[in-house]
Structures are given as C-alpha cells and as structure tokens.
C-alpha cells in the first residue's frame, strides 16, 4: 500500500451505497486497493503514509460533467442576460480576443477552484477557436493542476446570421483536422488521466454537414460527443425552422446519437425527446445554476431519473455561474426541483450526490473507473471537514454536505492516487501566482474585447 486513509466517515457511493463509520480506504499506485469498515478484516500491508480522517468525510471525488474553463476570466461581465444576448454581447466578443496565455491562465485557476471544492474530474467544452493553440493551452492547465480532464474539442461552423462573430466560425475541413490532431495527441495522455471528445457547440451555431462529419470522425476514432441541446426556446425553434424537428430529434435522425453522446442542458424537451434519450442511452448534463442564471428554464430531471436516463451534474462555465463549485451545485440541484415541482422529495440530498459522483461517471462513460470508492477503481478521493459554523452540528453526512456545506470544507484531494491538495494546501501549482496572473489576463481581455467593466454599470435598485 502507498496510502491509507483511516478513521473517517466513508461515503462509498458503491452499489449498496454503504456509509462506513469509521471506514478505511487503502490506495496502491493509482487505484483503490481496499475499502471497508475499520479495522479491515484483511488489513493491507503497512503503508508508508497514513492520513487520519477522524471526524471527517471521505468521499469519491466530485465530477463536473460540463464547463467552459476559458470563461474563468469572465466572472461577472455577462450578468442578467438571456443566453443569446449573453453570447452576442459578452462571451462571443471576449472569445474572439482569447490568446493561448488567456486560456492557460483561465484553465489553471478554473481547475484550482474545482480542486478546492472537491472536484476531481472536469469535463471542459472548448468551443471557441479564433486562433490555433487554444485547445493545447487548456489541456496544459489540466495536466499541470492534476485534475482528471475530459477535454471536448468543440467548434462553431455557422451562426453569423444569429449574431455569432465571424472570427469564431471555422471551416469544416479545418475543424475536422484539428479534432483529429487533438484526439491523437491527448486522448489517453497522463496515464489515461486526459480524455478527448468532440463537440458541435449548439444547433444555431452548426451546420447539418458538420454534425454528420463530426459523428463519423468520432466513431472512427472511438471518442464520444457532446453538444448543448434544447437549452432555450430559441435553440429549439431554430432547429424547427431549419430542419422541421427539434434539435434532439434532428440528432437522432442523422445518426449523431449512434456515438455515445452527452446532451448538455436538455431543458425544453418534449415527451418524444425523453423517449429518444431513453431509447438511445444518451446521457444528460444538468446545469441547474446556469439554467437559473440565464433564465433558461428547468430541465425535467426527475422524469429523466425515473426513466433511467443517465444524468450528471455540472457547473457550466463561470460566465453563466460565476464559479466552479460543485458543492454549490448539489444544493441548487436539489432545491430547484423541489420548488419547481412543489414536491419536497423531487430530488433528495442522496440523489443530488449520486448525480455528482457515480451518476456523473455513468453519464461520461467512466463508471468503471471513477465515481465511487470501490476496489480496483481509480483513487480519486476527497476528504472534507464539516465541523464548522456552516455545517455543524452534524446529523447526517450527506444532508450536511448537500444542504449546509459551502465548498471550503474540502481539505485533501487525491487524484489517480496522488495528493494534489493536502490539509488545504495545493501541491501542484503556485496558487497565489496563478490567481494574480489570471486577474491580469481577465482585465486585459475585457479591454481588448472592448467589453465594459461591470464596475461601471449603474446600480439597479429595488423599486421602493
């Protein structure tokens, strides 16, 4: 054994959903070698390192199924807009001005925030490529911070008529060539810690030809697909106007869903759409904070779960959430559906945690590797101390984590058997330096893109 975690309350997320009080997790190399109540019936050989987690929670690392790391530099400028205006007025212009250095700095700080709030797997959808090298810059940030990264080489090949800046529209042949380059360069990198997917951005920014060609390339290279689906009424109407069916129905019609696909958002679905998701085994990324922030609507997640559709939680990009904190998302996911359905049991604390761990792993096709603390799986483990004024006194560990924790409770994060944060100190990169560099990059990006600073906007008072 290389590392043994003892004494904590171990929330395994295994098929029996065991909670071991106290429990033991033993790690050898990159994988979990033993999990059980303390003391273990068959204790592992002595480990050179032991972490005493007495009084703390030990859990599988959280999994963020959808974000846009470049948006780490855009926390705040796009407040209080619907998606289409949010993109046309802020995110699109900023994306046109992105440099490799911007994307690297944003990725580092975005991954640091993820680590600090207990996220070990980050799926990044990089759909803006005004110049070469941006994919490589984001992946470099993932590699250096130590996260488990699923990188989506996204793209835009249409949409100028709907406000997409021409600088973001790529020629299809160039898109396909770079998708193949990124996959061959990085898929399986860092002993499998990095994976690659492909992703047309959303229906009003893509051509039918691009969708078909992307699916074929993904199938040839055995990588998955991702796309924003039915996020807003505009998106669905655009598909109806152009193709005669909604965007999800179009994806089924053209064979896009023949390749494992993560459909992001899925807010405005018909009953037929739900049947398509179920029949095709298509997974869904649920982004409750972003959907509220952009006033996009409420995805029918309780119905999806009842139908057995794989659902994983996500933050979405920091320009439509303003953080990468998956512990915040746990609470938002549970509360949003309670109030929307007026059913306090619509999404429970346990279900919210499932959607951020084993459910998210299933949505990404990684359930055999991560998402629970089981022997043979990758050792992606977090330790959180909830003995603080936010969460204490504790009565049930999952309830306290979902409804009371704020994210700062996470003390130790282990990814692939390697501590990347221990006792609250990040071990992989210089955090203070990274934050300072990201602040400078963010300020310069707004200036280059000629986006007004939020500091200059008028105060919007209550109407007394």
Image (cartoon, grey):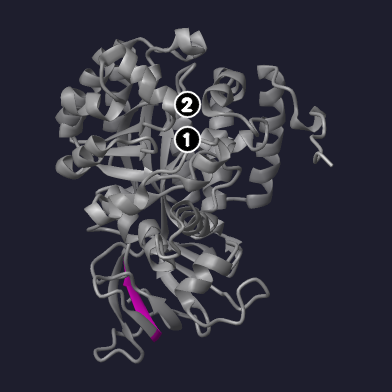
On screen, residue 443 above or below 119: above
| Total marks placed | 2
Quarter placement of the C terminus: top right
Q: Indicate whether residue 54 is drawn in magenta.
A: no
What segment is highlighted magenta in the picture? 21-29
| Residue 202 is at least partly visible in this image | no
Question: Which residue is tagged 2?
Answer: 134
The residue lying furthest to the right in this view is 464
Asked if marks 2 and 1 touch (Cβ < 8 Å), the reply is yes
The spot of residue 141 in percent (x, y) is 49, 41
Q: Which mark is residue 138?
A: 1
Crowdedness of circle 2 by 10 Å Cα count: few (<14), some, many (20+)? many
The spot of residue 54 in percent (x, y) is 51, 85
| Residue 398 is at least partly visible in this image | yes
User: Magenta: predominant secondary structure element?
Assistant: strand
Q: Residue at x 50, y 55 (%)?
A: 339
Q: Nearer the viewer, residue 330 or 249?
A: 249
Q: Secondary structure at mark 2?
A: helix
Horizontal arrangement in the rendering, residue 96 relative to residue 366 (left or right): right
Structural distance between the alpha carbons of marks 2 and 1: 6 Å
Q: Residue at x 57, y 22 (%)?
A: 85
Q: Residue at x 54, y 53 (%)?
A: 325
Q: Residue at x 19, y 45 (%)?
A: 278
Horizontal arrangement in the rendering, residue 415 relative to residue 373 (left or right): right
């Amino acid at each position: 054994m290389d590392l043994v975690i003892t004494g904590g309350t171990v929330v395994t997320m295994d098929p029996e959903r065991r909670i071991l009080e106290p429990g033991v997790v033993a790690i050898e190399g990159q994988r979990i070698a033993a999990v059980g109540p303390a003391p273990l019936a068959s204790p592992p050989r002595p480990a050179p390192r032991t972490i005493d987690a007495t009084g703390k929670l030990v859990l599988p690392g959280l999994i963020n199924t959808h974000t846009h790391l470049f948006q780490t530099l855009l926390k705040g400028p796009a407040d209080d807009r619907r998606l289409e205006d949010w993109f046309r007025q802020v995110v699109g212009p900023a994306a046109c001005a992105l440099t490799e250095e911007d994307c690297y700095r944003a990725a580092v700080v975005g991954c640091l925030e993820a680590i600090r709030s207990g996220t070990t797997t980050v799926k990044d959808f990089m759909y803006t490529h005004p110049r070469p090298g941006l994919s490589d810059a984001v992946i470099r940030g993932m590699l250096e911070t130590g996260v488990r990264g699923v990188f989506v080489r996204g793209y835009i090949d249409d949409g100028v008529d709907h406000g997409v800046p021409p600088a973001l529209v790529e020629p299809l042949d160039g898109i396909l060539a770079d998708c193949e380059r990124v996959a061959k360069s990085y898929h399986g990198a860092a002993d499998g810690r990095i994976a690659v997917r492909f992703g047309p951005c959303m229906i009003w920014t893509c051509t039918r030809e691009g969708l078909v060609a992307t699916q074929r390339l993904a199938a040839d290279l055995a990588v998955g697909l991702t796309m924003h689906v039915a996020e807003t009424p505009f998106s669905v109407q655009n598909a109806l106007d152009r193709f005669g069916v909604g965007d999800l129905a179009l994806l089924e019609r053209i064979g896009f869903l023949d390749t494992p696909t993560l459909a992001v958002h899925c807010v405005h679905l018909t009953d037929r759409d739900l049947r398509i998701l179920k029949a095709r085994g298509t997974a869904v990324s649920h982004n409750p904070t972003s959907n509220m922030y952009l006033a996009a609507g409420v995805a029918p997640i309780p119905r999806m779960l009842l139908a057995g559709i794989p659902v994983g939680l996500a933050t979405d990009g920091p320009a439509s959430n303003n953080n990468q904190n998956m512990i915040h998302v746990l609470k938002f996911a549970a509360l949003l559906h309670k109030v929307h359905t007026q059913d306090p049991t619509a999404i429970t604390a346990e279900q919210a945690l499932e959607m951020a761990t084993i459910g998210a792993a299933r949505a990404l096709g990684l359930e055999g590797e991560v998402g629970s603390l089981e022997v043979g799986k990758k050792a992606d483990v977090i330790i959180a101390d909830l003995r603080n004024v936010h969460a204490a006194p504790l009565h049930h560990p999952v309830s306290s984590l979902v409804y009371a924790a704020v994210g700062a409770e996470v003390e130790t994060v282990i990814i692939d058997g390697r501590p990347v944060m221990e006792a609250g100190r990040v071990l992989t990169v210089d955090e203070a330096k990274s934050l300072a560099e990201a602040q400078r990059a963010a300020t310069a990006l707004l200036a280059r893109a000629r986006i007004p600073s939020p500091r200059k906007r008028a105060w919007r008072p209550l109407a007394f």
